[in-house]
């Protein structure tokens, strides 16, 4: 294992942050897989999981069982880890600019296309994208973080960005081009929902990897072997247990063997619990007014159209407004905060239709 320390600037002179990346194996023997967790720094189940994975990969490397390259970043946002106010941790948005740490990754396709032609292979495409990234100015601490993480991801064949939701079952986000591969990971991890789209909007980390390649296809007029890039939502923020982390570690190791990252017996992926559905088919239940949320249903349930998942209580007059699913589907996530303001997103249900357009991810 090789540990690389990346120094990132702080917001004031004399301050900085250190980002550690852990590198296993060598180039040319198999796929290059990049895994990171904690980009939203207050989402910690993935931080625990990838810490465990690093310890296991050390052993496998000593046994000569790692093929290709594995790059692991268990704590991808040291800056966000420091953002505490009056005992509360705020790691989703930058405390200075209010930017979401998992949005606004750059479109490098125009600059990269200027260096390429229709005969370019994958290695040349990666080189051109990374060169275009290196030429971009770094104007803020958030830019520096994005630049460092995205450069490592652009070098890889497979990218897995590990997050978690508020209260949720394990689920995945991916691109329609990768439906089969996403289904394999969903099977190994027994993901409750797999949500696919052509473009999610907002240029989140995994989607930005895919969109850069898709836009290069359009500019060059070719079909490219686009790297697999997925977001894994590792249940909810409070789901931090050794039992769960051990089970997820086993699923990741089986998946890494399946895709050729580890030597050893390949076990075919189990069937995923639910078929993939469109990200545009997610029904978002919002609060029609302020009040206290009382849930009567939990993630993991399959709902029929019109099903009630709870109600919104007005604590002044005692009135209860039912919270209903219009379309039905697989109830996979809900918000932990039980005090809702009008218009707040409360629950998420994966349906088979397409109800939404535009930006498909929550803020």
Image (cartoon, grey):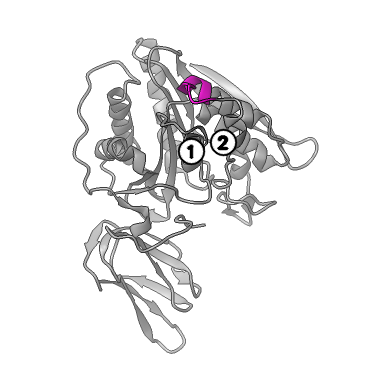
- Whether residue 62 sits left or right of residue 307 in the image: it is right
Asked if the magenta segment contains residue 120, the reply would be: yes
The crowd level at tag 1 (other Cα within 10 Å; few <14, some 14-19, many 20+) is few
Res. 29 in view: yes
Q: Is residue 17 above or below residue 330?
A: above
Looking at the picture, tell me which residue is in the foreground, 241 or 196.
196
Spatial CA distance of label 1 from label 2 is 9 Å
Residue 19's place in the image compared with 28, above or below, is below
Coordinates of residue 283 in the picture (x, y in percent): 35, 64
Q: Residue furthest bottom?
A: 317
Q: Secondary structure at mark 1?
A: helix
> Which comes sooner in the sequence, label 1 or label 2?
2
Instruction: Indicate which label's residue lies in the foreground, 1 or 2.
Output: 1
Asked if residue 108 can be seen in this view, the reply is: no
Frontmost residue, 317 versus 261: 261
- The residue beneath circle 1 is 218
Identify the image quadrant of residue 88.
bottom right
Proximity of marks 1 and 2: CB atoms separated by less than 8 Å: yes
Q: Which quadrant of the structure image shows residue 134?
A: top right
Q: Which residue is mark 2?
A: 109
Residue 26 sits in quarter: top left
Residue 139 screen position, x and y as percent: 73, 40
In percent of width and height, residue 263 lies at 30, 15
Q: Nearer the viewer, residue 201 or 266?
A: 201
Rendered view: 116 above or below 355:
above
């Amino acid at each position: 294992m090789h540990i690389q320390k990346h120094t990132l600037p702080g917001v004031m002179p004399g301050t900085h942050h250190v980002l550690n990346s852990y590198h296993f194996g060598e180039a040319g023997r198999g796929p290059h897989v990049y895994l990171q967790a904690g980009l939203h720094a207050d989402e910690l189940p993935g931080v625990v999981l990838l810490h465990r994975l690093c310890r296991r990969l050390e052993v496998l490397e000593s046994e000569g069982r790692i093929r290709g390259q594995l790059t692991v970043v268990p704590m991808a946002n040291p800056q966000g880890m420091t953002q505490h106010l009056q005992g509360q941790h705020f790691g989703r948005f930058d405390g200075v600019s209010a930017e979401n740490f998992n949005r606004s990754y750059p479109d490098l396709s125009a600059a990269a296309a200027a260096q390429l032609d229709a005969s370019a292979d994958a290695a040349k495409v990666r080189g051109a994208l990374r060169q275009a990234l290196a030429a971009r100015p770094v104007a803020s601490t958030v830019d520096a973080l994005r630049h460092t993480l995205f450069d490592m991801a652009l070098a890889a064949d497979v990218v897995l960005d590990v997050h978690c939701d508020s209260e949720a079952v394990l689920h995945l986000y991916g691109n329609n081009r990768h439906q089969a591969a996403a289904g394999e990971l969903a099977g190994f991890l027994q993901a409750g929902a797999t949500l696919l789209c052509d473009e999610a909007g907002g240029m989140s980390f995994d989607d930005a990897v895919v969109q850069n390649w898709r836009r290069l296809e359009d500019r060059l007029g070719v079909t490219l072997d686009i790297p697999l890039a997925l977001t894994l939502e590792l249940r909810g923020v409070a789901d931090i247990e050794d039992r769960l982390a051990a089970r997820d570690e086993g699923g990741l190791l089986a998946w890494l063997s399946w895709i050729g990252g580890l030597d050893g017996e390949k076990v075919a992926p189990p069937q995923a619990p639910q078929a993939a559905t469109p990200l545009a088919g997610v029904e978002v239940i919002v609060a029609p007014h302020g009040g206290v949320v009382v849930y009567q249903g939990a993630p993991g349930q399959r709902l029929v159209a019109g099903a009630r998942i709870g109600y919104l209580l007005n604590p002044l007059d005692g009135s209860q407004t039912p919270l209903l699913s219009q379309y039905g589907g697989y109830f996979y996530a809900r918000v932990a905060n039980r005090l809702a303001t009008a218009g707040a997103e409360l629950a998420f249900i994966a349906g088979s239709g397409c109800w939404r357009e535009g930006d498909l991810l929550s803020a």
